[in-house]
């Protein structure tokens, strides 16, 4: 491998504290895996329910290391020309027409398949960049199984093969994060190349800290109550449990409404911020008001 | 790391990987190498970090995490600092100190002087102390008490061939944690100022329940540590091996396993639905669509440059589920109904019937609410399924089914019959199945019993099965998932 492995972090502790300063509260698992990813030079596959801060993790790590974030949003139908590279046909055509009389065929041929006519897409951009980058491949479970294979070369060897140009190797090994909402099983080949990190809903204590860090001006008592009610709601059997971002929305709403302590009435009135299905709201409202 | 260190670490990890594979967790060679590389950067002394490092490199599926954790705890329990049992002098003095601090803080240490150590306490005092620890959420004291409780109440004898659950039961019986919860709620109500709303109370209760669960886990871990010390790692790993959620048998699942099964079901249905939708969309190319091709050729000046094809749109099957919900197979029926309704948009129509010795249609329960669990609950409580005595009578149920709903079975219908076909020696009426099959597209029978039990005793699955398009063994989620995918 041509690229040197740079070590960005000193210790797990340092990762955690650095992230904390950026208001991202990592637990043991998250900080540990981020540190390992740096040391081993391996991509991280982050899986978990929606809205638990998977994408935010990549953003925060980029900020922490002072790197540029290169993001590839995956969707069904994503292909090579949008993920890796594409030839700039129009420019190639112009080039041929401009030199119609002068150059020999060989010269033009070599010429139009050169760097100048190459349009880099996120994956290629990430490995050819001179400045430090963090590559985020978002919602990788949305592409088809066949398209996944596109990623394999770059994930294991940090290189891209272009038939006309040859193999382009990375100048530096970027930190790579792949996120998945787990809507389908990813292929073995992809999983094998990655470190695996499951990000679940945070524990009550951590959620309280997150609320305190992210919602300025909130009192500790209110944050405590919010996190306890959210934990209580998550233990119900719902279609969709409230995510961390929804918890934060709720906290901000309560703050705006100038509410100091939550009683049943306020909880019921504002439940629609936490829950997005009518059946879920009805169920939670019923559960919360039961007299025991 | 020196060379010998590395050697021993290699042996250690290889042993661990062997245990993981024995537990049914797939660990590939490259993953093993990654783990080897990872532990060079993480000291084994930092247990949590060490665990996460191994987990991140070797476990690539969240459902496997719990099994991994158990194996890890057992395998490395002899090698961590927690291995020091309460007998060791070191741990004891720390405990005593803690206890003295507690006494001073609560002002109860008067009569006993400084001599009171945890060992000298009466059971009542232990209970009192535990209640305080739980109310304040004092982790260190909870840990210490868990050890003390195991030492005192479990009555563990070396070499005795009894499982960990037995010791756990003995320990917890002596502590009476359910009574403890009530007492804690009472005490909390007294302490708080002003009236307590029911919301507050509910939150308080949940907090206490959470801490009690933590304490139980601590007791369990302590018992496990002692068992490992007694019997050795390999023997313990074997007894603790827990099946993965998708391999748990419906008919013998414990309550805990049921919970984990239900948790596993949700992501599974989501994946299944996505996979089926994809399968439908990316069907084969059909024959040339002449009309469409000519229409598009106009934009190329009449040259048919872009041939268009008719994509086959396979019809979605219509489904009729007929499920036995008598005691022994109720769990299986419940899971199948949940799975079928969770992906019901893959079928053009789903109707469901449940029976024991009488039969009742329950489709409306599922239509009335979006909440599948609620519908299942109504099925169990409201459906009219008992005709005479509430023992399975497949023959009668099928007969009534044919009489009432037989006319609705059509050439598009797929009929699913669920049950163990244990008919209590009633008449089988298998002609009904034969009739259904002649009208329906397919008839399948799903049996939650192991294949070797079929046609033994009062099971007559063979007699019914002869008239179906196939009898499938569906003992666990994995088999059920495989069948449903084939079906849609």
Image (spheres, coloured by chain):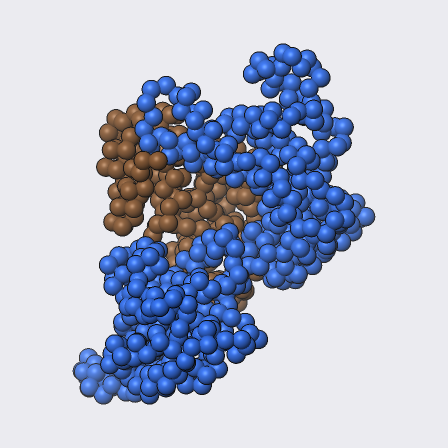
Chain colours: A brown, B blue
Q: Residue at x 26, y 42 (%)?
A: A272
Name the spot of residue B177 as percent of width and height, x first: 53, 36
**Camera-nearest residue between A214 and B231:** B231
Task: Out of A20 and B60, give the one closest to the viewer.
Answer: B60
- B138 w.r.t. B290: above or below: above
Q: Estimate the x, y position of residue B219 in percent, counting from the top left.
A: 61, 39
Residue A265 in the figure: left or right of residue B284: left
Q: Residue at x 34, y 26 (%)?
A: B196
Residue B77 is drawn in which quadrant?
Answer: top right
In the image, is B331 to the left or to the right of B232?
A: left
x, y percent for residue A164: 48, 70
Where is residue B324? Give x, y as percent. Answer: 40, 69
Residue at (42%, 47%) from the top-left corner? A55
Whether residue A107 is visible, yes or no, is no
Q: Name, please, the residue furthest toward the front.
A: B388
Split into 4 quadrants, where in the image is the N terminus of chain A? bottom right
- At 46% from the left and 46% from the top, the residue drawn is A200
Q: Is residue A254 visible?
A: yes
Of all residues shown, which one is farthest toward the right? Answer: B4
Q: On the rendered structure, is B6 left or right of B107?
A: right
């Amino acid at each position: 491998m041509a690229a040197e492995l740079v070590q960005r972090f000193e210790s797990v502790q340092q990762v955690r504290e650095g992230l904390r300063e950026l208001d991202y509260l990592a637990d043991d698992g998250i900080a540990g895996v981020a540190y390992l990813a740096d040391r081993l030079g391996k991509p991280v596959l982050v899986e978990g329910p929606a809205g638990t801060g998977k994408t935010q993790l990549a953003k925060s790590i980029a900020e922490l290391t002072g790197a540029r974030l290169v993001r590839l949003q995956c969707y069904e139908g994503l292909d090579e020309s949008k993920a890796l590279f594409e030839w700039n046909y129009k420019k190639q055509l112009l080039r041929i027409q401009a030199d119609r009389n002068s150059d020999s065929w060989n010269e033009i041929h070599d010429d139009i398949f050169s760097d100048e006519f190459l349009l880099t897409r996120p994956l290629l951009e990430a490995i050819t960049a001179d400045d430090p980058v963090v590559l985020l491949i978002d919602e990788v479970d949305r592409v088809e199984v066949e398209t996944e294979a596109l990623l394999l070369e770059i994930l294991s060897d940090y290189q891209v093969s272009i038939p006309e140009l040859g193999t382009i190797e990375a100048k530096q090994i970027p930190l790579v994060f792949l996120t998945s909402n787990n809507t389908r099983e990813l292929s073995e080949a992809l999983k094998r190349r990655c470190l695996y990190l499951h990000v679940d809903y945070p524990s009550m204590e951590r959620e309280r800290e997150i609320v305190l860090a992210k919602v300025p001006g909130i009192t500790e008592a209110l944050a405590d109550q919010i996190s306890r009610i959210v934990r209580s709601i998550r233990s119900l059997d719902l279609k969709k449990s409230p995510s961390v971002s929804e918890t934060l929305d709720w906290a901000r709403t309560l703050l705006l409404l100038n509410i100091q302590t939550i009683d049943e009435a306020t909880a019921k009135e504002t439940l629609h911020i936490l829950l997005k299905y009518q059946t879920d709201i009805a169920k939670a409202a019923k559960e919360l008001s039961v007299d025991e | 790391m020196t060379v010998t260190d590395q050697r021993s670490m290699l042996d250690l990890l290889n042993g661990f990987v062997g245990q993981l594979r024995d537990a049914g967790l797939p660990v590939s060679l490259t993953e093993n190498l990654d783990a080897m590389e990872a532990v060079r950067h993480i000291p084994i002394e930092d247990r949590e970090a060490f665990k996460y490092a191994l987990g991140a490199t070797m476990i690539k599926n969240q459902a496997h995490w719990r099994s991994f954790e158990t194996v890890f705890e057992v395998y490395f329990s002899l090698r961590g600092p927690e291995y020091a049992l309460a007998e060791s002098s070191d741990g004891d003095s720390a405990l005593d100190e803690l206890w003295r601090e507690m006494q001073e803080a609560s002002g109860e240490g008067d009569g006993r002087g400084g001599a009171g150590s945890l060992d000298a306490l009466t059971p009542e005092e232990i209970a009192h102390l535990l209640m305080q620890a739980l109310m304040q959420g004092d982790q260190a004291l909870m840990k210490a008490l868990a050890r003390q409780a195991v030492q005192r109440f479990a009555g563990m004898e070396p070499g005795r061939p009894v499982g960990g659950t037995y010791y756990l039961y003995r320990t917890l019986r002596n502590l009476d944690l359910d009574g403890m919860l009530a007492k804690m709620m009472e005490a909390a109500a007294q302490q708080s100022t002003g009236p307590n709303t029911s919301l507050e109370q509910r939150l308080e209760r949940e907090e206490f329940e959470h801490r009690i669960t933590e304490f139980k886990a601590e007791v369990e871990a302590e018992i496990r540590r002692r068992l490992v010390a007694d019997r050795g790692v390999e023997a313990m790993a074997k007894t603790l091996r827990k099946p993965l959620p998708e391999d748990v048998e419906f008919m013998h699942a414990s309550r805990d396993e049921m919970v984990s099964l239900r948790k596993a079901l949700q992501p599974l249905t989501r994946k299944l639905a996505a996979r089926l939708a994809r399968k439908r969309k990316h069907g084969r190319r059909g024959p040339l669509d002449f009309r469409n091709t000519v229409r598009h050729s106009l934009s190329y000046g009449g040259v048919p440059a872009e041939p268009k094809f008719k994509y086959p749109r396979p019809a979605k099957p219509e489904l009729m589920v007929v499920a036995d919900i008598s005691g022994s197979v109720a769990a299986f029926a419940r899971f199948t109904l949940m799975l079928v309704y969770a992906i019901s948009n893959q079928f053009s129509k789903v109707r469901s019937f449940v029976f024991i010795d009488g039969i009742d249609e329950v489709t409306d329960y599922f239509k009335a609410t979006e909440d599948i669990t609620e519908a299942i609950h109504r099925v169990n409580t409201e459906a009219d399924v008992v005709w005479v005595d509430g023992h399975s009578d497949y023959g009668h149920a099928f007969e009534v089914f044919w009489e009432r709903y037989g006319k609705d079975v059509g050439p598009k219908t797929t009929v699913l019959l669920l049950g163990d076909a244990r008919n209590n020696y009633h008449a089988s009426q298998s002609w009904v199945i034969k009739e259904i099959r002649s009208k329906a597209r397919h008839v399948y029978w799903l049996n939650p019993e192991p294949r070797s039990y079929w046609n033994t005793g009062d099971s007559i699955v063979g007699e019914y099965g002869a008239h179906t398009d196939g009898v499938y063994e569906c003992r666990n989620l994995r088999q059920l998932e495989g069948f449903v995918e084939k079906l849609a």
